[in-house]
């Protein structure tokens, strides 16, 4: 009996370890995930595969910079050969005895084992190494700006998906309120019909109105699911993971002036900074093309030793060394250098014009985003007043209908107007939030600045 108790206790302890202490399998949904906007942005920047793929470009550009630095250092190489088979050189000596054949001697002028070391140090390359290094450095800076642009795009897309989910939830609330209001009105009409104060026609229209609103509620609920899928995809989380968003669509005044926003955009926009770095790269490319006509100087040397047998006894190996000063002067290359210079200059002019065009586009984008923000703000304030009036209209229509001073059509029209006012107000909140997000993206300032 005692052994059975001990065995049962051991099994219980083992099950406890399995179910309570062991971590769950990776990727398995862990209950409901509560997300704020800030947490959603953080997850997207950590998990979104498209943004992570862009970040790898920085690693690639950094490796190219290290490669450019490596060209300044000396190179050292070692080599060794082992001759497996060879044809010996035969020397023939005439015989000093008349009538005797000539004497043949086979001579081995090679060695079966040969080893050596060689090195080379660049002294002057006409600026090729310096220009190559600066090109790689500017390329890294331009790549960082490109990744920053991808970050801004990711943040904007997360905000759109996050606010879109909140808007879809608002539409569900509006649809539910419309269904509840229609159901409440149906009960009121049914009560009046039973006491003879309402017609059967009004009762039927109330039932039809309620039935027509239920599919709208189902469509709104389906839009919430679709919005959740879109947000989960952006955040790189499992589609089976349940989420709950903490936040709401609210109005927060945006008090920065248009002139200040334009100044910030011209200083912060990654596309503009990236073009400036690319233009500097083109300038270095011009120097690199011109350096092709300049001489190069390098110091090199080698140390070689050989033997017929692979042992390291004293006297078995013979050796020699050499040091060289190498001067290379280009004389004629078919005018390729001048063509490369012209090509690099054209690239520099193209980037300069593109930069000027980008400045004009940024000015227009800031202006458009500013006007959209003002329009969204005015629309929101007007819809807020409209919602208050629609709510009061429904209250008065219901009251007058109960007193026999209004028709069913009056009540129905007031309810439809209220539903539309609630929908418009929610949409106005979303439009204002997105107008702010668009303006922040147009300025080029990310969440860390």
Image (spheres, rainbow, N blue to C red):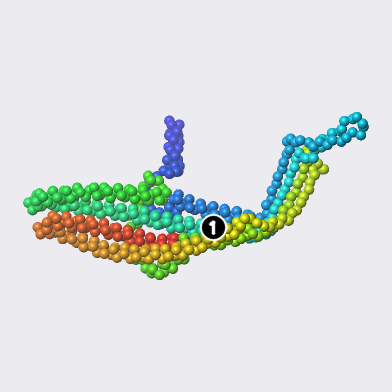
Q: Is residue 241 visible?
A: yes
* Helix, strand or loop for disc 1: helix
Instruction: Name above or below for residue 134 compared with residue 320.
Output: below
**Residue ID for mark 1:** 139
Question: With respect to residue 170, does 313 lie above or below?
Answer: above
Residue at the outermost left position:
196
Left or right of 323 in this view: 224: left
- Residue found farthest to the right: 97
Q: Residue furthest top?
A: 99
Q: Work out whether 6 lies above or below 221.
A: above
- Residue 303 location (% of width, % of height): 75, 49
Which of the image's four quarters has the N terminus?
Answer: top left
> What residue sits 77% from the left and 45% below the top?
305
Tell me the crowding category of disc 1: few under 14, some 14 to 19, or many 20 or more residues within 10 angstroms, Cα based: many
Q: Is residue 187 visible?
A: no
Tell me how many marks there are: 1
Foreground of the two, 84 or 331: 331
Identify which residue is drawn at 33% across, 61% down: 432
Q: Position of 137 compared to 445: left or right?
A: right
Residue 114 in the image: state x and y as whole percent: 75, 42
Q: Residue at left 73%, top 39%?
A: 82
Residue displayed at 50% across by 61% down: 350
């Amino acid at each position: 009996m005692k052994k059975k108790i001990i065995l049962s206790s051991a099994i219980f302890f083992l099950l406890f370890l399995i179910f309570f202490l062991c971590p769950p399998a990776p990727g398995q949904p862990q209950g409901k995930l509560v997300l704020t906007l800030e947490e959603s942005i953080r997850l997207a920047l950590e998990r979104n595969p498209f943004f992570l793929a862009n970040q790898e470009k920085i690693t690639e550009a950094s490796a190219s910079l290290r490669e450019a630095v490596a060209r300044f250092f000396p190179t050292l190489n070692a080599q060794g050969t082992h001759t497996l088979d060879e044809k010996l050189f035969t020397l023939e000596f005439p015989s000093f005895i008349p009538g005797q054949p000539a004497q043949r001697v086979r001579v081995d002028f090679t060695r079966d084992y040969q080893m050596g070391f060689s090195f080379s140090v660049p002294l002057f390359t006409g600026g090729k190494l310096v220009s190559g290094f600066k090109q790689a450095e500017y390329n890294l800076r331009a790549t960082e700006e490109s990744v920053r642009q991808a970050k801004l795009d990711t943040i904007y897309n997360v905000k759109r998906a996050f606010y879109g989910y909140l808007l879809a939830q608002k539409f569900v609330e509006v649809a539910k309120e419309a269904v509840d209001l229609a159901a409440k009105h149906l009960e009121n009409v049914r009560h009046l019909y039973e006491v003879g104060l309402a017609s059967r026609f009004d009762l039927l229209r109330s039932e039809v109105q309620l039935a027509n609103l239920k599919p709208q509620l189902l469509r709104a609920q389906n839009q919430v699911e679709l919005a959740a899928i879109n947000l989960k995809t952006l955040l790189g989380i499992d589609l089976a993971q349940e989420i709950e968003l903490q936040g709401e669509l609210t109005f927060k005044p945006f008090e920065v002036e248009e002139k200040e926003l334009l100044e910030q955009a011209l200083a912060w926009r990654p596309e503009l900074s990236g073009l400036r770095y690319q233009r500097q790269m083109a300038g270095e490319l011009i120097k690199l093309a011109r350096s092709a006509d300049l001489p190069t100087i390098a110091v090199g040397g080698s140390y070689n030793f050989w033997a017929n047998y692979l042992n390291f006894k004293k006297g078995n190996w013979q050796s020699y060394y050499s040091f060289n000063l190498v001067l290379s002067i280009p004389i004629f290359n078919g005018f390729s250098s001048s063509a490369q210079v012209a090509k690099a200059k054209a690239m520099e002019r193209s980037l300069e014009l593109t930069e000027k065009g980008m400045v004009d586009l940024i000015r227009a984008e800031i202006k458009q985003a500013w006007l959209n923000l003002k329009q969204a703000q005015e629309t929101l304030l007007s819809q807020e007043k409209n919602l208050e009036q629609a709510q009061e209209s429904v209250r008065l229509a219901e009251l007058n209908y109960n007193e026999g001073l209004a028709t069913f059509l009056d009540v129905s029209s007031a309810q439809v107007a209220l539903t539309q006012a609630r929908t418009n107000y929610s949409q106005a909140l979303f439009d204002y939030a997105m107008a702010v997000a668009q303006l922040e993206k147009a300025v080029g300032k990310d969440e860390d600045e």
